[in-house]
Image (cartoon, rainbow, N blue to C red):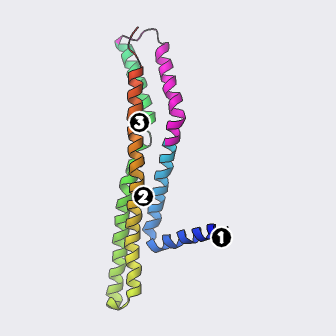
Amino acid sequence: MYWLTDAIEAIRDFMNLGGPVLKVIAIAIFLMWVLIVERILYFRSTMRARSREVQETWEARSERRSWHAHQIREMMISRFSESVNRGIPMIQTFVALCPLLGLLGTVTGMIKVFEVLAASGSGNVRAMAAGVSQATVPTMAGMVGALSGVLFVTLLARRAVREVEFLEDSLTMDH
C-alpha cells in the first residue's frame, strides 16, 4: 500500500512543480480521455445496435425507390452519422487546447523568472530554477496530452467515417 501513497505524493509534487496552469492542463487531459473512452465504448456496443436498427427499419420499408424514400434514407444516414460523430469535435478541441495551455504555462513560468531577476538579480538561482521548471513542465504536459489524444481522435474519426460509409452502402435502393 506504500506504493500508492508514494505515487500520490509524486503526482502532487509534480503538480506543484508545474504551477497553476498544470492543474488546468490535467483537467483538460482528463476530460479529453473521458470523451475518448466514451467513444470507444460507444463504438464497441451501442453503435452496432444502432446500425442494425437503421438497416432493419430501411429493409422493412415496402417502397425504396421514390424521392420520398430517398430523403428518408438520407435522414436515417444523417442521424446515424450524427450519433457516431458525437463528441469527436470536442476531443479535437481538447487536443488543440493542450499545447496552447502548455504555452500559457511557459509564459507564466517565464514571468516568474523575470520577476525573480527583477527583484534579486541573477544571484537567486534557486528561485529562478523554480520559475524555469514552472515554464517547462506545463509545456511538456501539454504536448504529451495532445500527442496522446491525436492518435485516438484520428482513429475514432476514421472509424466514424468508415461506419457511416458502410451504412450508406448497406441501405439498398431497390424494390
Q: 83 left or right of 128?
A: right
- Give coordinates of residue 75: x percent, y percent: 40, 24
Q: Residue at x 35, y 88 (%)?
A: 119
Q: On the image, numbered disc 1 is attached to which residue?
A: 2
Q: Position of residue 50 (x, y in %)?
A: 51, 28
Residues at marks 1 and 2, CA–CA distance in whole angstroms: 28 Å
Circle nearer the N terminus (3, 1): 1
Give the residue at mark 3.
160
Please say if 167 is above or below 120.
above
Question: Which secondary structure dominates the residues rendered in magenta?
Answer: helix
Residue type for callout 3? Ala
Residue designated by label 2: 145
Quadrant into which the C terminus falls: top left
Residue ID at (40%, 74%): 134
Residue, x 44% and y 39% (percent of image)? 86
Magenta-drawn segment: 40-66
Q: Quadrant of residue 24?
A: bottom left
Q: Amino acid at mark 1?
A: Tyr
